[in-house]
Image: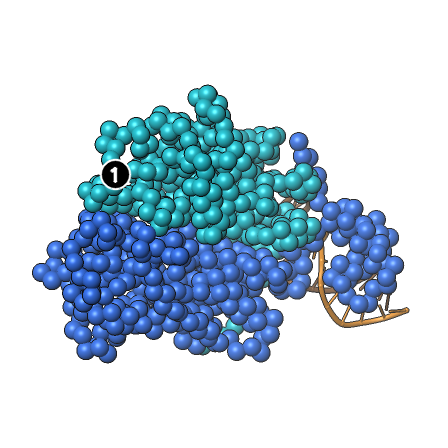
Chain colours: A blue, B cyan, C orange, D brown
Amino acid sequence: MPEARPQATMADVARVAGVSVSTVSRALRGMASVSPEARRRVEHAARELSFAVSRSASSLVTGRTGRVAVLTPGVEAWFLGAAVSGVASVLRECELDLLVYCVTDMRERTEFFRRLPAQRNADALLVVSFALKREERERLDALGMPVVYVSQHAPDRASVYVDDIAGARSGTRHLLNLGHRRIAFLQSQDDTAFAWSSQDRLVGYRRALEEAESPYDESLVVRGRGRRGIREAVGQLLSLPQPPTAIFVEDDQMAIETLAVLRSCGIRVPHQMSVLGFDDQDLAEPMGLSTIAQPAEEIGRAAARLAQAIISDPECDPARHVVLPTRLIPRATTAPPPERRADHRPPTAQNPSVGSADAAPH
Amino acid sequence: MPEARPQATMADVARVAGVSVSTVSRALRGMASVSPEARRRVEHAARELSFAVSRSASSLVTGRTGRVAVLTPGVEAWFLGAAVSGVASVLRECELDLLVYCVTDMRERTEFFRRLPAQRNADALLVVSFALKREERERLDALGMPVVYVSQHAPDRASVYVDDIAGARSGTRHLLNLGHRRIAFLQSQDDTAFAWSSQDRLVGYRRALEEAESPYDESLVVRGRGRRGIREAVGQLLSLPQPPTAIFVEDDQMAIETLAVLRSCGIRVPHQMSVLGFDDQDLAEPMGLSTIAQPAEEIGRAAARLAQAIISDPECDPARHVVLPTRLIPRATTAPPPERRADHRPPTAQNPSVGSADAAPH
DNA sequence: CTGAAAGCGCTTACAG
DNA sequence: CTGAAAGCGCTTACAG
């Protein structure tokens, strides 16, 4: 069994190496003004004692913590996991540590903004996918540390995001171009207003309809959270006097659940209903899901790079924006609506639903 | 635009409140020996100045960082994301910060164990899903801080895990009980030996076969990584002289991809092939996937609680183990093999594949 | 109940 | 190239 032994300090290393603490500090940070001989002895002693410098002590004097904090509504959703991964990979290269604040409900959120635990414990804060209230924004402004907004547009603040409006607009256009005229939009129930993206995607959807001079029908915009909620939202659409022929779903996770609901009702995708997602997460391709791809990991990477730039160069424009592209990936869940299809005919075993031989990738 | 203003120190608060720094420190930590009047003034001043205590400074004197570190091969895989979420939620309650070290490839791994950046920067380290080499284990033992092993059994060290052997054994037994005699096992390609779980699940599979006196056939154990790899692994099975009638897949993500591959070949699940996963991740239910559920988030929570216990109570048994249960969740992707089915007959439109009306959840 | 002082482990001018 | 000394912002005996 391992023994807990006291950790070596710089003074210990100095004693073993036969030099002063100053020299140890300089040698370990690779400063030039150290003789090869002293450097060798210090490195040897440090290794022998398993010495690691205490960031608490060094940060006290340098004023830098060597840490970057991320505030996120979680890490389980595909986008968040990928974004945090991207952040982590860049920080590792910069030898910065990653502090994660997961805030999943309103109580935790209130508590975070009250205590602001990141204050003085990180050199920068990345805020991922939060639709902030004005007071919250002001709290962050008063933090006295660089803040980078991720997956959201923040005027006059550093931010990294994709143009959700443009992405949703091109997705909707894709459906319009296929000949759909009744296009539904399925949104997550977002009581706590965690994400802007959801709202922006709806804006993009509406804009594409406007541009096509296709009437906006409120009854085609439905919301649902969780398995049950999605089933009910789809139920709303299917019970409309004129049901839609296509559903644009806010993200791939919900889109895949929507596919399952439709299949369980015996509705064939895309023959009777087109489904379009947003994200291009790992399962989108195997499921044959048409979607709007966004580079989640790259968003995280760009945000971390931006934070690092602001930290290390105070002259750097602190309101810099990075906007990354989305791309439509048409797969097997979008097709012309039934009335427009050349092969329009009732279902048979030769005309199976999505995921079967004729529709799957490869 | 926000102004970066210098952060207030305890001395600032003391000045504004008209008391000494000691009193500020005591008042802010809620110690009893502070007069109501002094406490009020301190709290007021602290709020006014947006004061937050510097953990760097306090940890230098208390010897505790107020941080717990997690070493993980990522946060994107379902299990890892859920486990980290669980850790985060418990730490938040304890007002401990979460430091995340994502190590995704061999180079980063080597680097982590060389530098050990968590040393002296956290009060405990949680190691998630790593199949450690002896040297790596020794490095962690020498760390001089509590280490909790998550999702892996570590003799004489604190650890939290599910019994993967038992889980895989009961899954395999489920397939045997349905009447399957040719059961394949699909494993991830695991060059870097990141996870023990994979190996243990194979052990459980073999054990169940032995117990049923069902012969172990090496050609039924296949490996593949990524989309392409899974397709090839399934191809191996389908080209066997005697193909399997069921596939036990190492995790749900791969199982869902396997379903997509089978569908794209026109093989109906479960009528022609049963598929069983492991995890019970979010999409398992909507996909109708039969699986072995494991409580990933609870594993994370238990690990964080264990770390907290060891940190705050040095008398606490540092080798405590927490073993959590797995449960078989039979859904729509497992059924008796074709030759044993009462309704054995060729595919028709009335006998659709998984996910269609008769098989889906409600 | 309160404050002055020492000290945690580093880095950084400063002097040599 | 090197070392002694000051100081970063706290907490904690210690004395009152």
Residue that mark 1 sits on: B346
Q: Is residue A114 visible?
A: no
Q: Secondary structure at mark 1?
A: loop
Depth check, front residue: B164 or A57: B164
* Quadrant assignment, res B154: top right
Q: Quadrant of the C terminus of chain B?
A: top left
Task: Give neighbour class at mark 1: few <14, some 14-19, many 20+ (Cα, 10 Å).
Answer: few
Q: Residue furthest left?
A: A241
- Residue B349, picture quadrant: top left
Question: What is the x, y in percent for residue B190?
Answer: 55, 44
Letter of the chain that mark 1 sits on in the rendering: B
Residue A6 showing in the rendered view: yes
Residue A235 coordinates in the image, percent (x, y) = 17, 53
Taking the spot 73% from the left edge, 49% from the top edge, the residue there is A51
Marks counted in the figure total 1
Task: State the residue in front, A263 or B340.
Answer: B340
- Residue nearer the viewer, A71 or B240: B240
Identify which amino acid the numbered label 1 is placed on. Answer: Pro
Residue at horizontal 44 percent and vertical 44 percent from the top: B234
In the displayed structure, would residue B2 be above or below residue B85?
Answer: below
Q: Position of residue B297 (x, y in %)?
A: 43, 42
- Left or right: A125 with respect to A175? right
Q: Is residue A335 left or right of residue B240?
A: left
Residue in the picture at 27% in, 43% down: B353
- Quadrant of the image for the N terminus of chain B? bottom left
Q: Residue A65: x, y in percent?
A: 60, 60
Q: Residue furthest front?
A: B241
Question: Residue, x 68% and y 35% (percent of image)?
Answer: A3
Image height of A88 relative to B362, above or below: below
**As drawn, is A302 to the left or to the right of A38?**
left
- Does B330 sit left or right of B166 as displayed? left
